[in-house]
Amino acid sequence: MTGDTRRPSKLADVARLSGVSTATVSRCLNTPDRVVPATREKVLKAVAELGYAPNFSARALAARQTFTIGAVIPTMENAIFARGIQAFQEELGRLGYTLLIASTSYQESLEEEQIRNLAARGSDGLLLIGHHRSNRVLDFLQGREIPALVAWAHNDGTAALPAIGFDNAGAMAELTREVLARGHRRIGVISAQTAANDRARLRVAGIRATLADVGLGSAALSVIETQYGFDAGGAAFSALMSQEASPTAVMCGNDVLAVGALRAARELGISVPNDVSITGFDDIEIATLVDPPLTTIHVPHGAMGHRAAQMLVQMVTEKRLNMPSVELSTTIVLRATLGPSPGND
């Protein structure tokens, strides 16, 4: 049997060809985990043969849902968010939802615009990155009763939205203790702009607090804020190393900045880690590909993405605007870019 070229195939056509009920076809397409593999295979074969496309408009009208989830992320230009968003999309697909993505280029005004656009297009829920946004946006979400979940950060009880993520300050503090344990007392930091980025702000705060704990004041720390990107990381590293009392360790707010710093060090003839140590944050794939491999903080991107999808769909289906936040653990990955201080303090 082949698809009727005079009209689109219907759910009943798929059911007839696969020898199951229309209810089973619907379950297979919407909640495939509830259908035994053999039946699911028959249904999907019939779907492919007939070229069947579900009528999501009718489904949305009946359920008063669009079965779409929006995600507003800061950038698509590098891999910082890629693994987590990929896992998020995969799990949403398994749960019968479609993902719409917008990016903001780290601009607050553009984030607000994208949130409003996704809401206008009927997104059932929104995934947002970090807690920094205006009360106007929070009031809009509350007034429209749109479930929103924050990722890449955790909620310590003071934030307005539930979150699944990690302690940015705590993770960076732990890495700072590793740096100090190797004798480093002059620390350089390459960070994203902190004014509108709570994740970057907290990572710098974690470094500052740890230095203060061991009696090191502001003279021990040099911070450069820059744009995300390899070139930006390299330029910031060059500026740090041109200082009269250059740092013996440079801690970067993410792996992209750190790889840019590594490249600049090579171009400047500075040996890593013999002359200076460099660390990152995120543990994206490039951290293992550079030479020397990068010491960094491993973020559980995949687990975060999967669980974020589950949490947000639960919020949508249960019509909840809040639920308990989940804090995930990070780990330090020690590789070759962190070594002892060269002893020129």
Image (cartoon, rainbow, N blue to C red):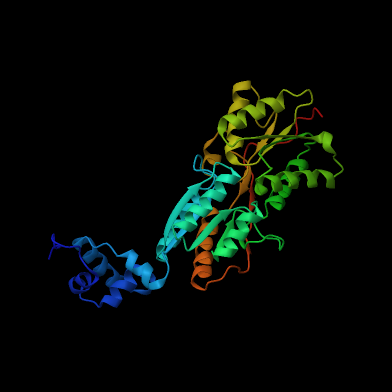
How many numbered marks have been drawn onto this rendered protein structure?
A: 0
The residue located at (63%, 61%) in the rendering is: 161
Q: Considering only vertical position in the picture, is 217 above or below 156? A: above
Q: Considering only vertical position in the picture, is 284 above or below 120? A: above
The residue located at (42%, 70%) in the rendering is: 64
174 relative to 283 in the view: left or right: right
Residue 198: percent from the left, percent from the top? 67, 49
Image quadrant where one finds the C terminus:
top right
Residue 187: percent from the left, percent from the top? 75, 35
175 relative to 212 in the view: left or right: left
Residue 300: percent from the left, percent from the top? 57, 54
**Residue 97's quadrant in the figure?**
bottom left
Q: Residue furthest right?
A: 215
Asked whether residue 99 is in view, the answer is yes
Residue 179: percent from the left, percent from the top? 73, 41
Asked whether residue 328 is in view, the answer is no
Image quadrant where one finds the N terminus:
bottom left
The residue located at (71%, 63%) in the rendering is: 157
**Residue 257's quadrant in the figure?**
top right
